[in-house]
Image: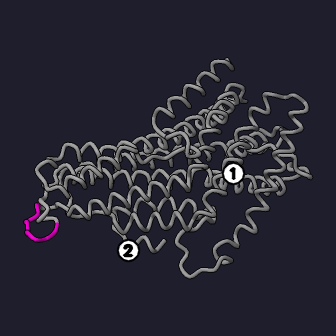
Amino acid sequence: MNILEQYSEDYSINFRPRFKLLHMASVKFFGINKTWWQTNWHFLIIIPLLMFQFVTMWIYMYNKLSQVQIYEIAYLLPPFLIAIQGFIKAIVILPNRVKINTIIKVLGEMWRAENLTKIQKKNKAAIFKKLNIYNSVSLWVSAVGVTQYLLTPLIETMVRRLILNQDCEMLLPLSCAYPFDSGYNWIVYLGVYALQIFSMLLWVFFYTGPEWILVTICALIGSQMILLRDDILHMTPLTNSEINGNVKRKSKSGEIPLYVFVNRHQKLIMLCQQLDEVFNRMIFASLLFVGIITCFFRYAGKFSRGPTYMLNNYTAVFASLLQVLHLCYYGELLSGASMSIGEAAYQNPWYNGGTTYQKTICFIINRSQTPCSLTSMRYARITLNMFTKAYKTTKENAVEDD
């Protein structure tokens, strides 16, 4: 993570909280002079514990399926699906850390923090403001939801047993078929509870962390494209002699040369393609599971044991939809920003320039006809329309359940 210090502060500050979150799950970026063993030895401990927890959840749920206890299955399935999605996202991000590092490095090297116009500073600040709001809201919603979900059973058990002196069952956040009695005594109970908290937190880190990295990179690339849009809109047309260097022309303050613009534009397009190559399978999994997870969380909320458990489930519904909303929003931002470069180039008075300038502008317009976008399995583009469809599907399923 120290590599980020060599880039502009307004760039690196966007990645530090995300890397810190994934670091808690032993997913490290920018390992300098570290061997594979030094970087990944933690997984020799983490993976067996997670697999043990996952298998016990699966066995318990299978037993309930055979007994046709649908209400309890509705309560068990959401965390089970989050665990599956956490595994999928871990499988996506772990082998692709080098590619993600490369994207972040290239974007950091071409990051623009100086010599910006007032409009560019305003547009850049607006994107950062929305990104910071998203980060704060999603972080707090996830933190509050996970804390409630994991600690509510423990608090209820302690209150009923230690204060009310009731001989009640020792509740756990996750129902599992352990090969021993998890409620044998307080030591065993608290040990199992700690294992479940550890496992669930790791799954949540894997569930949310890669999505935050994706959204952050997408927002930063989109901001750079919006800067290029303003550059090409106000670029002064050049004659062939000026482009070839035979005639010198004094540039306006903040104006970049045409060849620099083309180079940056091509690099941003390349970064978008690399970003989609890394994350398109993860995006497919997110969209596939969001409808199922939210429906079951909502179903579990209807038949919860009390208002606290109901709040836990509805918080999870909100957090899941919020995550997909922001993914689709920044996918829309990226597509719109890339296409707006072509529109701005068309509005530029290119007809006053030489033939070389005109051909370059035509190339930029043509290149911008195909928007840069995130996709699901390289098929469906991620836009706000995608979120609308996902939300309608979830709502229709909820109405059918009612």
Q: CA distance from mark 2 to mark 1?
A: 35 Å
- Which residue is labeled 1 in the image? 200
Give SS at disc 2: helix
Q: Amino acid at mark 2?
A: Gln
Q: Is 315 placed above or below 52 here?
A: above
Left or right of 244, for residue 165: right
Query: Which of the 4 image quadrants contains residue 306?
Result: top right
Q: Is 391 placed above or below 324 here?
A: above
Q: Nearer the viewer, residue 389 or 370?
A: 370
Asked if the stretch drawn in magenta spans residue 124, the answer is: no
Give the image location of residue 292, x and y in percent.
67, 34
Left or right of 402, for residue 162: right
Asked if the stretch drawn in magenta spans residue 246, the answer is: yes
Q: Nearer the viewer, residue 103 or 321?
A: 103
Q: Which residue is at 45% across, 46% downward?
A: 373
Give SS at disc 1: helix
Please, what is the dominant secondary structure of the magenta stretch?
A: loop
Give the image location of residue 285, x and y in percent.
63, 44
Q: Nearer the viewer, residue 142 or 182?
A: 142
Q: Is 238 placed above or below 387 here?
A: below
Q: Which residue is at 10% across, 71% downward?
A: 246
Q: Amino acid at mark 1?
A: Met
Give the image location of residue 95, x and y in percent.
63, 64
- Which residue is labeled 2 in the image? 6
Residue 28 numbered tag: none
Q: Nearer the viewer, residue 207 or 286?
A: 286
Region in magenta: 244-252
Q: Which residue is at 90% across, 33% downward?
A: 66
Q: Residues within 10 Å of mark 2 (few under 14, many from 20)?
A: few
Left or right of 27, for residue 163: right
Left or right of 82, for residue 166: right
